[in-house]
Image (cartoon, coloured by chain):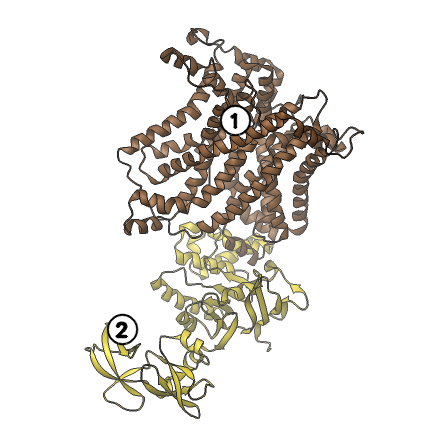
């Protein structure tokens, strides 16, 4: 509830931050060369080039395969997991809540690396498996493996949405079904699952378009056998022609946005629909859990197996890899233990800088981002006018742009705008890109905190004589303090985890761990990558520990 | 408009999108008077109160407080809520959970840049007035519902607004406390000589608390008047139905004699009553009689009819009798238990309204 002038200023700044980079990408896509070259003119030849490239089509095909495949895997598993966790007497449900969500907070590039060192041809688990059974039945570098891993690591996303929908479902509708004579499983099939189907549909679209944006896993796992997806194809284009091929990258980016943006709009429509369903919810009385009987141990075992594959295998692989100098068949790991990789990290200035920068961008940058999101949130808070609806759409837009491309677009902005150029090699450019990429996520956190404030508390402030701005300062903001703290911690974790957005912004002074890993991986410095990955996970882990300590809810 | 009028609403209209909520409402509130806005849910009573407070956006009409126009569509005046200087007691009390009782009440004075020592003095005076001074350092969640309500009233009164608005002030209290709070609140308003506009959906609450009642229906004022007028002289079927417990029967006008009419009811009974409709003989009409006006009689006679007593229900201070008359269920009250069977029921002609 800001006054008109700052309100307009905030919205104008927001619109500029989102649409200028996006516009630049689309503009660049219809130029015949990089926009800074005087010879570049309007043309569709960049599209002609990529459409002529068989690699583009195979990448597009793979992208659809990944998006569809991971939806098929993640949605049923996530929905079942949610039902078991929310509605049954599974042993250790409380204890499992947090580990289930870990894959969301681990950087995909770190995860991918973890799978390579654990399940790759000479990975720890592969070697052990081979010693025990004489052979390894999997090939981690195949497209199928990428799909399965992407599917399994996206189960938590589905779990988040379906579990909160299931929790919101009043137990009275289920009890009514029980009293009409339905068995517990009939209740699940005929009442509970149909009633959360809008949430499932919503998350289905979400997972599908996350499949379009996926970058870290295919970058690392798809490389050895040359499986490209659109994002990795875009990344490879960087060096394909020798000269900067910005127009080609922009054309690929435009193609991706052409698919993801309608999906984002579809998601928004579905969310509205889902909310309509939720508003019919009954009293959320205490729910009697469904008795699983002996089945509960099977369910428990399956969840542990899933956790083992998605969390324990990659994380332990990285941890182990970061402290051994060599590995493989016949190597006794105890004899090759070393801290040399960490020494290597802490001896090089760029590495130290990337760690410091990562911490800075998570803490200070996170706080700044939350402040910015709060300012935007207050401009639309309890205002249902044209400006608020406009902000709604602006906030959604970055959702459709994968981090890699957003980073590229921001890089161009800082290249293109003369007075911004000096900021290009400062951390500000990275922060700006991060803040824009995570705009939708951050705004959800802020808006859900703001919605907790009863409207009459603010109206009471108005009535006793406080202006809109005073009400924001004296009533709304103090009341959402805890929500802001929680948002800050979650943004911290998300910013630590981020890797693709910083890739194109990587320059001396702007190193962050995630982007550094991507760049080091290309140069084959596996030892350092392992050490940095572990440090990265440790930072996220610290954020997670603090968040849990303060009772921050990891989901809504 | 006399100079005793403190709040005046003139032809106020308000819509949510294309859905009209208030369709031209006019009313006056005199200094020291309590007026209730009564009506079923969706009648626009809360919207009217919130429009006066400046929390809803009307599109037509005007609102004047103590001679000062705070809203006037024609003159393009729309004073924001915080400049209207009104006191509003919210249905949910809307106490700020992050401020103590003292800070809640002090906040309006702080906004008015009152000196610190005067704030302390005035807040304590206001709290003392409401019997709350020992709770000043508590937080709202540490108070009972009744105490929260008093804090909310203290906060609305501390800056001496010319008019205090109360939105369903008793609805958050349990049934027993509600009656006590009703008496306490009426007493407070009278003692402090407040001018109050009260929204309520409960007709007995409205009658008990106010000098005048405005009954709203579908965004217009159906009837206004003193509680006795509203209860005893309803001008429309809606008012008659809303204001009390009634026996309602349908039928056709059988005969008309000046201000009286005979209605031949579908249940076979014919009664004379006060004519409140222009319907001609042979047209459909409704007969309404308050439950307490229908009474048992010993024998047949004018406006008496034989009905089937089904049961007697004990209500504590009285019995309620339930009769069958054709397809209708009729009710009346009495002081003793009656066995089921045939009985004579009298519907006195001056208590039957025909709409």
Q: Can residue A15 be seen in this view?
A: yes
Quadrant in the picture for the C terminus of chain B: bottom left
Quadrant in the picture for the N terminus of chain B: bottom right
Marks 2 and 1: CB-CB under 8 Å? Answer: no
Front residue (pair B182, A210): A210
Q: Provide the letter of the chain coloured brown.
A: A
Residue at (70% x, 21% y) in the render: A241
Left or right of residue A424: residue A140? left
Residue, far left: B339
Task: Give chain B's shade.
Answer: yellow
Where is residue A542 drawn, in percent x and y?
48, 27
Residue A371: mark = none
User: Which residue bears the numbered disc 2?
Assistant: B317
Front residue (pair B308, A341): B308
Where is residue A215 drawn, in percent x and y?
56, 27
Query: Which type of secondary structure does the marked residue at label 2 adopt?
Result: loop
Where is residue A231 drawn, in percent x and y?
60, 28
Residue, far right: A38
Q: Is residue A296 above or below residue B213?
A: above
State the CA–CA distance, disc 2 to disc 1.
74 Å
Badge 2: chain ID: B
Badge 1: chain ID: A
Left or right of residue A344: residue B336? left
Residue, far bottom: B257
User: Which residue bears the numbered disc 1?
Assistant: A108
Q: Is residue A42 above or below residue B124?
A: above
Query: Which type of secondary structure does the marked residue at label 1 adopt?
Result: helix
The crowd level at tag 2 (other Cα within 10 Å; few <14, some 14-19, many 20+) is: few
């Amino acid at each position: 509830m800001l006054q008109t002038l700052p309100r307009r200023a905030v919205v104008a700044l927001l619109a500029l931050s989102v649409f200028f980079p996006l516009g630049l990408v689309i503009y660049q896509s219809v130029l015949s060369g990089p926009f800074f070259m005087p010879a570049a003119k309007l043309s569709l030849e960049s599209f002609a080039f990529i459409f002529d490239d068989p690699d583009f089509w195979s990448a597009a095909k793979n992208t659809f395969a990944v998006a569809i495949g991971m939806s098929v895997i993640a949605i049923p598993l996530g929905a079942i997991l949610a039902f078991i966790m929310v509605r049954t007497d599974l042993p250790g449900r409380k204890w499992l809540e947090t580990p289930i969500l870990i894959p969301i907070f681990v950087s995909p590039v770190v995860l991918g690396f973890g799978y390579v060192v654990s399940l790759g041809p000479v990975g720890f688990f592969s070697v052990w498996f081979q010693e025990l059974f004489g052979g390894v039945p999997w090939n981690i570098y195949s497209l199928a493996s990428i799909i399965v891993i992407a599917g399994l690591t996206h189960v938590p996303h589905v779990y988040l949405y379906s579990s909160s929908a299931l929790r919101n479902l009043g137990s009275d509708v289920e009890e009514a079904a029980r009293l009409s004579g339905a068995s517990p499983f009939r209740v699940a099939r005929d009442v509970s699952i149909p009633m959360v189907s809008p949430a499932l549909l919503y998350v289905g679209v979400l997972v599908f378009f996350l499949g379009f944006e996926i970058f870290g896993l295919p970058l690392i796992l798809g490389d050895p056998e040359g499986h490209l997806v659109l994002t990795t194809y875009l990344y490879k284009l960087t060096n394909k022609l020798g000269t900067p091929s910005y127009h080609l990258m922009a054309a690929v980016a435009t193609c991706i946005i052409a698919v993801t943006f309608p999906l984002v709009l579809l998601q928004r429509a579905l969310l509205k629909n889902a909310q309509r369903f939720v508003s019919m919810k009954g009293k959320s009385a205490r729910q009697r859990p469904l008795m699983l009987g002996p089945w509960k141990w099977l369910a428990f075992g399956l969840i542990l197996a899933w956790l083992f594959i998605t969390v324990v295998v990659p994380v332990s692989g990285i941890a182990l890899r970061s402290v051994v100098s060599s590995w493989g068949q016949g190597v006794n790991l105890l004899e090759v233990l070393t801290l040399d990789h960490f020494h290597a990290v802490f001896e090089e200035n760029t590495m130290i800088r990337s760690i410091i920068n990562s911490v800075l961008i998570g803490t200070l940058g996170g706080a700044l981002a939350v402040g910015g999101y709060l300012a935007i949130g207050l401009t639309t808070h309890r205002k249902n006018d044209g400006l608020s609806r406009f902000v709604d759409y602006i906030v959604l837009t970055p959702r459709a742009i994968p981090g890699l491309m957003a980073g590229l677009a921001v890089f161009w902005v800082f290249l293109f705008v003369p007075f911004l150029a000096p900021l290009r090699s400062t951390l500000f450019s990275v922060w700006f890109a991060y803040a824009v990429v995570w705009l939708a996520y951050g705004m959800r956190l802020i808006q859900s905190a703001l919605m907790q404030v009863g409207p009459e508390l603010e109206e009471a402030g108005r009535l006793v004589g406080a202006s809109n701005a005073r009400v924001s300062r004296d009533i709304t903001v103090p009341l959402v303090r805890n929500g802001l703290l929680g948002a800050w911690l979650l943004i911290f974790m998300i910013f630590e985890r981020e890797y693709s957005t910083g890739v194109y912004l990587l320059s001396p002074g702007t190193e962050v761990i995630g982007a550094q890993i991507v760049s080091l991986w290309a140069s084959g410095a596996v030892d350092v990558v392992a050490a940095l990955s572990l440090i990265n996970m440790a930072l996220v882990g610290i954020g997670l520990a603090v968040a849990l300590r303060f009772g921050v809810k990891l989901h809504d | 408009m006399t100079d005793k009028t403190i709040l005046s609403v003139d032809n106020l209209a308000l819509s949510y999108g294309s859905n009209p909520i208030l369709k031209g409402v006019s009313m006056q509130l005199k200094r020291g008077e309590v007026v209730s806005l009564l009506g079923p849910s969706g009648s626009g009573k809360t919207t009217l109160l919130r429009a006066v407070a400046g929390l809803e956006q009307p599109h037509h009409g005007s609102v004047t407080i103590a001679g000062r126009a705070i809203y006037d569509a024609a003159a393009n005046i729309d004073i924001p809520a915080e400049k209207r200087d009104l006191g509003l007691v919210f249905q949910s009390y809307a106490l700020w959970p992050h401020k103590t009782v003292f800070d809640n009440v002090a906040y309006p004075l702080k906004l008015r840049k009152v000196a610190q020592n005067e704030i302390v003095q005035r807040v304590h005076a206001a709290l003392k007035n409401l019997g709350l001074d020992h709770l000043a350092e508590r937080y709202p969640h540490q108070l009972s519902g009744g105490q929260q309500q008093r804090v909310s009233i203290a906060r609305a009164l501390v800056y001496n607004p010319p008019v205090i608005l109360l939105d369903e002030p008793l609805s958050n209290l349990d049934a027993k406390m509600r009656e006590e709070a009703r008496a306490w609140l009426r007493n407070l308003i009278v003692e402090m000589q407040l001018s109050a506009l009260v929204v309520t959906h409960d007709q007995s609450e409205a009658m008990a608390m106010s000098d005048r009642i405005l009954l709203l229906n579908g965004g217009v004022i159906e009837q206004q008047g003193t509680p006795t007028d509203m209860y005893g002289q309803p001008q429309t079927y809606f008012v008659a139905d809303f204001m009390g417990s009634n026996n309602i029967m349908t039928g056709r006008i059988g005969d008309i004699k000046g201000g009286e009419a005979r209605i031949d009811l579908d249940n076979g009974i014919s009664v004379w009553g006060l004519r409140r409709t222009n319907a001609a003989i042979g047209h459909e009409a409704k007969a309404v009689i308050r439950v307490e006006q229908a009474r048992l009689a010993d024998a047949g006679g004018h406006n008496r009819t034989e009905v089937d007593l089904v049961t007697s229900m004990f209500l504590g201070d009285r019995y309620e009798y339930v009769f069958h008359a054709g397809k209708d269920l009729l009710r009346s009250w009495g002081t003793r238990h009656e066995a089921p069977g045939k009985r004579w029921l009298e519907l006195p002609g001056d208590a039957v309204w025909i709409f």
